[in-house]
Image: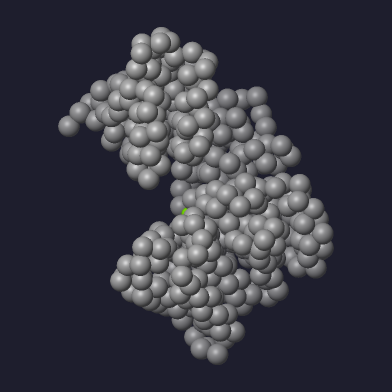
């Protein structure tokens, strides 16, 4: 049976991490493995700076490029002492391609260039990791994910064509899986019908693992992380967190959607649709049990809560004191959709509509300007959104210590609070 593994940026952040990933692979000698890797460490952030420097013609362009290249060549040289190893030439070729991508005049949109440039992080990472896996467990096949995962041309947020992707997987990938016990490919990237590269949204490698598992009817997906599994709160903000052994797809999607960074929210749907279990396990302690996400009727055993920072609360009211009814709402939703602003929480009163959104100036400012043509718009920024699943009063008290609550919404299982830190 086929297992899909995903190694994120932290699990391939340096030579030691790549060696550790290889050691994990070796623990599964009998299995057919399809491995998805992300860009190494914080490479995607560096590549985002490179895109900015390219598009806005900044003089930092060369320095950023050189740093990215040095980072990867250093890892290579720690993995392969023989400088004539084929991996060096492959990575060199990829950097030539990256150089080309930043030499062109910017003929397309920012987002289009973003995808052609930023995707190179995954391409280069996958070359290095595949070459190393090949050394320690011979016969690791490198596969270009863009030949399988097909998307539309919404750059930076490619919409996956599942039907076409599944057809390509059946035709191209399934036969390869019969010949190779280990195949390695890239997370986060896809291809369009015009052969351009798209990306699936930041942190999208988990989603890739789910798409490939869906398309090949894999037995399971395992995401290898630097945490022991899914915890009931983010250990970055709270001490005294508890690991959850087992989670339903529904609880997982609710937690991920509202900011639990442990899994990308889009990951769950393809897995749920084919009833494929998802394991979240530690790459530091690979034999520990981790968390399993699967179909079950047992909901979370304890209240779980998530903080999403950098939130903004926008209140929109018609200038003429008319009601916020369906006609106004459909117009407002249309504008949010047009500006690609996702609503995290919303609340309605007679003459106002409040929404909590991620603070992304590039998108929000134009949206607010457009809204102001017809509505009065008030907003607060630098807020936090707290979501508690299976809430109780003591958890609400615990998360709202020293915070001012600006908006609160309770449903049967979930409470959401938009809060401001009282300094
Ligand atoms: N490398 C991409 C990112 O950092 C995708 C991923 O890590 O999942 O967003
Ligand atoms: Mg990542």
Identify which residue, 137 or 359, lies in the foreground. 359
Please state the horizontal and vertical placement of residue 11, each as a whole percent of the image.
49, 59
One can see residue 206 in this view:
no
Please state the horizontal and vertical placement of residue 288, each as a whole percent of the image.
54, 49
Q: Is residue 238 above or below residue 402?
A: below
Quick one: quadrant of the C terminus?
top left
In this picture, residue 123 sits left or right of residue 323: right
Q: Residue at x 51, y 88 (%)?
A: 83
Q: Is residue 290 above or below residue 177?
A: above
Q: Quadrant of residue 189?
A: bottom right
Question: How many numbered tags mark residues here?
Answer: 0
In this picture, residue 354 sits left or right of residue 107: left
Q: Is residue 412 above or below residue 247?
A: above
Q: Residue at x 44, y 26 (%)?
A: 345
Please state the horizontal and vertical placement of residue 99, each as a whole percent of the image.
47, 76
In this picture, residue 169 sits left or right of residue 203: right
């Amino acid at each position: 049976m086929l297992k899909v593994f995903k190694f994120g940026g932290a699990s391939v952040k340096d030579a030691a991490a790549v060696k550790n990933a290889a050691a994990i692979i070796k623990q599964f000698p009998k299995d057919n493995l399809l491995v998805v890797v992300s860009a190494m460490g914080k490479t995607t952030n560096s590549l985002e700076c490179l895109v900015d420097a390219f598009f806005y013609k900044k003089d930092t362009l060369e320095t950023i490029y050189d740093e990215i290249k040095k980072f990867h060549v250093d890892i290579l040289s720690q993995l392969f002492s023989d400088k004539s190893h084929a991996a060096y030439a492959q990575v060199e070729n990829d950097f030539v391609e990256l150089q080309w991508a930043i030499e062109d005049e910017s003929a397309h949109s920012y987002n289009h260039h973003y995808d052609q440039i930023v995707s190179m992080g995954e391409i280069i990472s996958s070359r290095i990791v595949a070459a190393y896996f090949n050394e320690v467990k011979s016969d690791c096949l490198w596969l270009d994910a863009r030949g399988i995962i097909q998307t539309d041309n919404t750059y930076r947020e490619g919409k996956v064509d599942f039907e076409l992707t599944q057809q390509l997987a059946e035709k191209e990938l399934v036969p390869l899986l019969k010949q190779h016990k280990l195949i390695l490919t890239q997370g986060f990237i896809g291809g369009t019908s015009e052969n351009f590269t798209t990306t699936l949204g930041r942190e999208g490698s988990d989603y890739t693992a789910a798409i490939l598992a869906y398309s090949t009817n894999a037995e399971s997906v395992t995401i290898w992380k630097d945490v022991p599994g899914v915890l009931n709160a983010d250990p970055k903000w709270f001490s005294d967190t508890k690991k959850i052994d087992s989670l339903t797809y529904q609880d997982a999607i609710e937690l991920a959607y509202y900011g639990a960074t442990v899994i990308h929210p889009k990951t769950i749907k393809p897995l749920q649709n084919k009833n494929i279990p998802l394991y979240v396990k530690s790459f530091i302690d690979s034999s520990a049990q981790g968390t399993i996400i699967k179909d079950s009727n047992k909901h979370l055993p304890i209240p779980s809560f998530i903080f999403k920072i950098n939130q903004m609360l926008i209140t929109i009211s018609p200038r003429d004191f008319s009601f916020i009814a369906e006609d106004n709402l459909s117009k407002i939703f249309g504008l949010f959709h047009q500006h690609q602003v996702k609503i995290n929480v919303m609340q309605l009163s007679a003459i106002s509509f409040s929404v909590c959104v991620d603070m992304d100036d590039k998108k929000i400012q134009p949206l607010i300007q457009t809204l102001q043509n017809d509505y009065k718009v008030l907003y607060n920024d630098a807020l936090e959104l707290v979501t508690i699943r299976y809430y109780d009063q003591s958890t609400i008290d615990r998360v709202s210590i020293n915070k001012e609550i600006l908006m609160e919404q309770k449903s049967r299982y979930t409470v959401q609070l938009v809060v401001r830190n009282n300094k």
